[in-house]
Image: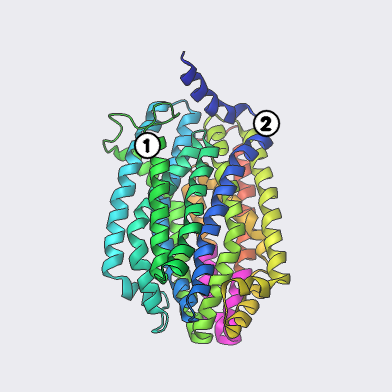
């Protein structure tokens, strides 16, 4: 057996043998760094745009772009999360060939879906932006930013999809460097294009496109190297419909989560426009960018957790499964609790980072005080949902995601603002976070009991 083969084999088998805390640290730390860097990447855009362009409406315009970009991200996650989870499970079953077929099929799906949605978005962009709450004041900024950033979205999808696969096949450090490269480049180019070249909002979009191009090249080149644990091979690119179905089935959970989130954003933005105007919509930028840092930390923990859970579920090492879950939950709650405290006690400092207008800042301060009240429990809810996704139980993960996004949030948005105005909109967030976490706890306890049942046989 060659040295290369031994090294590849050890990268995978450590998932079933190494101490859980060491594995979770090894896989999650690079993922956390990578996801936080990606969050900072977007935060830099918002801060630079908010201070480079002296018009309060630009912040509202950026807020309107979030749900549209979330839809694009959702389509990337449909393939990325599905393929990474399936690869982890089949690697746990020692099926290298099937993992290679999943790899080859996923790249074609990503490109086809990416080109399709970019074309549709470009054609119907203004109606889509109005649907998501754009006012006559914010629409020009939202339109300009998205028209320039859309061409790079398929590159972002490739980066996200194969970054997950890279991590799942034993390269967490390299996956982290992928995100670092893009974020550092964007942090340099965005201020240069806005302040140096005076390109306005399109400068931030072009900086993002260039960063996406570089990161996509870096991550894809990994899978063309024969020394990689998993790499492209002849015969693996032919469409395999059972494989495609399995990718889409598992990827449907994060896809629907993001689609639901975009739909909720549309309802929220329209409610905010009615009860608080463009200033209230601008406050969403502050809230979203702030909590994104902590959510991304938790998502990094989940990304590190995923290959450990997938491999040990595939090899039926359920004791290691539960240890990983328990440690991930504790870690996640510590971080979201930190975010909840910061949001409660330092809202003005946070708002001032993104805004110059005093009226906007006051609105954002009120937003943060209310929306972060129960944010501490969000870490548990995210890990619990990702537990089901990591085991290939997509339907349960989708249900948990939709309980918060659809079943609880929409009725509250239709009821509370009518009685409490703008504060009613903000109050929907903490109520949904708490109730959704209770539902997650009940489902998680039920599933753990089923897995512990020795008479239960899982088709993994």
Task: Identify the secondary structure beneath mark 2.
Answer: loop
Q: Where does the image place residue 232, in percent across and percent down from the top left?
A: 35, 32
CA–CA distance between discs 2 and 1?
29 Å
What kind of secondary structure does the magenta stretch mostly adopt?
A: helix
- Are the two marked residues, 2 and 1, in contact with CB atoms closer than 8 angstroms? no
Q: What's the mark number on residue 17?
A: none
Q: Is residue 87 above or below residue 376?
A: above
List the residue tagged with mark 2: 19
* Residue displayed at 61% across by 80% down: 361
* Range covered by the magenta-colored residues: 404-430
* Residue displayed at 70% across by 66% down: 342
Please state if 136 lies on the left or on the right of 423 as rendered: left
Classify 10 Å Cα crowding around label 2: few (below 14), some (14-19), many (20 and above): few
List the residue tagged with mark 1: 102
State which quadrant residue 61 falls in: bottom left
Q: Nearer the viewer, residue 417 or 41?
A: 41
Task: Identify the secondary structure beneath mark 1.
Answer: helix
* Residue displayed at 51% across by 51% down: 396
Q: Is residue 137 magenta?
A: no
Q: Nearer the viewer, residue 351 or 446?
A: 351
Q: Where does the image place residue 293, in percent across and percent down from the top left?
A: 59, 59
* Residue displayed at 53% across by 85% down: 276
Residue 13 appears in view: yes
Q: Where does the image place residue 119, in percent across and percent down from the top left?
A: 26, 61
């Amino acid at each position: 057996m060659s040295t290369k083969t031994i090294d590849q084999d050890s990268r995978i088998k450590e998932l079933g043998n190494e101490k859980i805390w060491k594995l979770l640290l090894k896989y999650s730390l690079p993922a956390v760094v990578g996801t936080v860097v990606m969050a900072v990447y977007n935060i830099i855009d918002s801060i630079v745009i908010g201070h480079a362009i002296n018009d309060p409406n630009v912040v509202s315009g950026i807020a309107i772009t979030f749900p549209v970009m979330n839809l694009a991200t959702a389509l990337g996650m449909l393939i990325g999360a599905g393929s990474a989870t399936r690869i982890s499970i089949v690697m746990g079953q020692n099926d290298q060939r099937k993992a290679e077929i999943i790899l080859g099929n996923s790249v074609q799906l990503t490109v086809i879906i990416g080109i399709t949605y970019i074309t549709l978005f470009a054609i119907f962009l203004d109606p889509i932006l109005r649907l998501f709450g754009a006012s006559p004041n914010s629409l020009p900024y939202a339109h300009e930013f998205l028209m320039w950033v859309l061409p790079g979205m398929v590159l972002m999808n490739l980066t996200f999809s194969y970054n997950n696969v890279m991590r799942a096949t034993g390269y967490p450090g390299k996956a982290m460097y992928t995100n670092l490269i893009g974020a550092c480049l964007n942090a340099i180019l965005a201020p240069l294009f806005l302040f140096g070249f005076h390109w306005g909002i399109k400068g931030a979009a072009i900086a993002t496109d260039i960063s996406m191009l570089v990161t996509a090249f870096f991550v894809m080149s990994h899978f063309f190297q024969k020394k990689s644990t998993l790499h492209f091979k002849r015969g693996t690119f032919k469409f395999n419909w059972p494989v495609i179905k399995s990718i889409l089935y598992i990827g449907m959970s994060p896809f629907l989560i993001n689609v639901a989130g975009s739909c909720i954003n549309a309802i929220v933005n329209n409610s905010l426009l009615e009860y608080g105007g463009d200033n209230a919509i601008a406050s969403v930028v502050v809230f979203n960018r702030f909590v994104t840092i902590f959510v991304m930390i938790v998502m990094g923990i989940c990304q590190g957790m995923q290959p450990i859970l997938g491999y040990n579920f595939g090899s039926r090492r359920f004791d290691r499964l539960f240890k990983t879950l328990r440690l991930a939950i504790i870690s996640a709650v510590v971080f979201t609790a930190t975010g909840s405290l910061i949001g409660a006690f330092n809202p003005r400092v946070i708002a001032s980072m993104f805004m110059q207008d005093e009226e906007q800042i006051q609105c954002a301060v009120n937003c943060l005080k209310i929306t972060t009240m129960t944010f501490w429990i969000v870490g548990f809810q995210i890990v619990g949902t990702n537990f089901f996704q990591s085991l290939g139980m997509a339907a349960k993960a989708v249900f948990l995601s939709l309980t918060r996004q659809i079943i609880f949030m929409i009725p509250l948005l239709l009821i509370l603002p009518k009685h409490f105005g703008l504060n009613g909109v903000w109050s929907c967030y903490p109520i949904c976070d708490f109730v959704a976490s209770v539902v997650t706890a009940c489902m998680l306890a039920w599933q753990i009991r089923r897995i512990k049942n020795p008479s239960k046989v899982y088709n993994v």
